Image (spheres, rainbow, N blue to C red):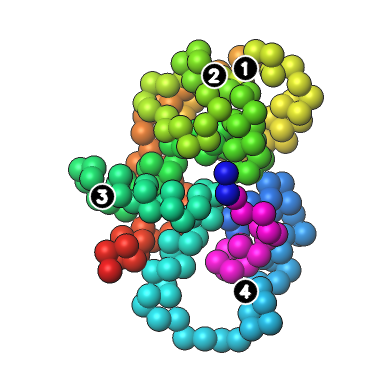
Amino acid sequence: MARYTDAVCKLCRREGQKLFLKGERCYTNKCAVGRRSYAPGQHGQDRKKTSEYGIQLRAKQKARRYYGVLERQFSRYFEMAAKKPGMTGENLLRLLETRLDNVVYRLGLASSHAEARQLVRHGHFTVNGRKVNIPSFLAKAGDVIEIKESSRGSDKFKAVIDANSSRPIPKWLDLDRNTLQARVVSLPSREDIDLNVEEHLIVEYYSK
């Protein structure tokens, strides 16, 4: 499966904000955005007037890179969102937010989206008692998500959970830290999604 393999800090610098792609490093003074707050490349510090199309493109790229989704899959999510009732932009973010890898990240069971995707792919999680190793699996309200019993005692999970214990869990999710059993309380509303992106610009981008 195709995936981005270059330095992820370049993506944050290109979008001009932290996308938290490196986990704990993003919270330290080693973060590339804090040290070099300009776009990568030899022309990164040049000031250029951004066109309307460029603004829309940046909004789309920011959301795509934050969730770690490639272009073809992102456009499929947009098509799915457009067919649902309600506002297309909010529907799109809701679909991305309920991906299993993102749910794992939001619960603090992984330090980054990339780590969450890897853990899901390696079969460490169950949904409603069944193993799911597909990062793009869309969780629904009422789904119960657990770390597979054989994985719960691993040092890796203990370290990750301890490191992320202070990270707030969104209200649409619930986690019992004693049993490590989580539940999707409801589908997220726009207010529950803290991604700093204007989704109407993404809709305008695809509507051209």
The dot on residue 131 is 2
Left or right: 194 with respect to 3? Answer: left
Asked if marks 1 and 4 touch (Cβ < 8 Å), the reply is no
Sequence order check, earlier mark of 1 and 4: 4
* Whether residue 138 can be seen here: yes
**Label 1 to label 4: alpha-carbon separation:** 41 Å
**Three-letter residue code for mark 3:** Ala
Asked if marks 2 and 1 touch (Cβ < 8 Å), the reply is yes
Magenta residues, start to end = 3-17
**Label 2 to label 3: alpha-carbon separation:** 30 Å
Sequence order check, earlier mark of 2 and 3: 3
How many badges with numbers are in the image? 4
Q: Residue at x 59, y 50 (%)?
A: 3
Please tell me whether mark 2 sits on a helix, a strand or a loop: strand
The dot on residue 39 is 4
Identify the residue under disc 1. Answer: 148
**Three-letter residue code for mark 4:** Ala
Q: Residue at x 36, y 77 (%)?
A: 52
The dot on residue 82 is 3
Single out the mark in the foreground, 4 or 2.
2
Left or right: 92 with respect to 38? Answer: left
Please tell me whether mark 1 sits on a helix, a strand or a loop: loop
**Label 4 to label 2: alpha-carbon separation:** 41 Å
Q: Is residue 169 magenta?
A: no
Residue 37 drawn above or below residue 157: below
Single out the mark in the foreground, 4 or 3.
3
Sequence order check, earlier mark of 2 and 1: 2
- Graded by Cα atoms within 10 Å as few (under 14), some (14 to 19) or many (20 or more), the crowding at tag 4 reads some
- The quadrant the N terminus occupies is top right
Sequence order check, earlier mark of 3 and 1: 3
Please tell me whether mark 3 sits on a helix, a strand or a loop: helix
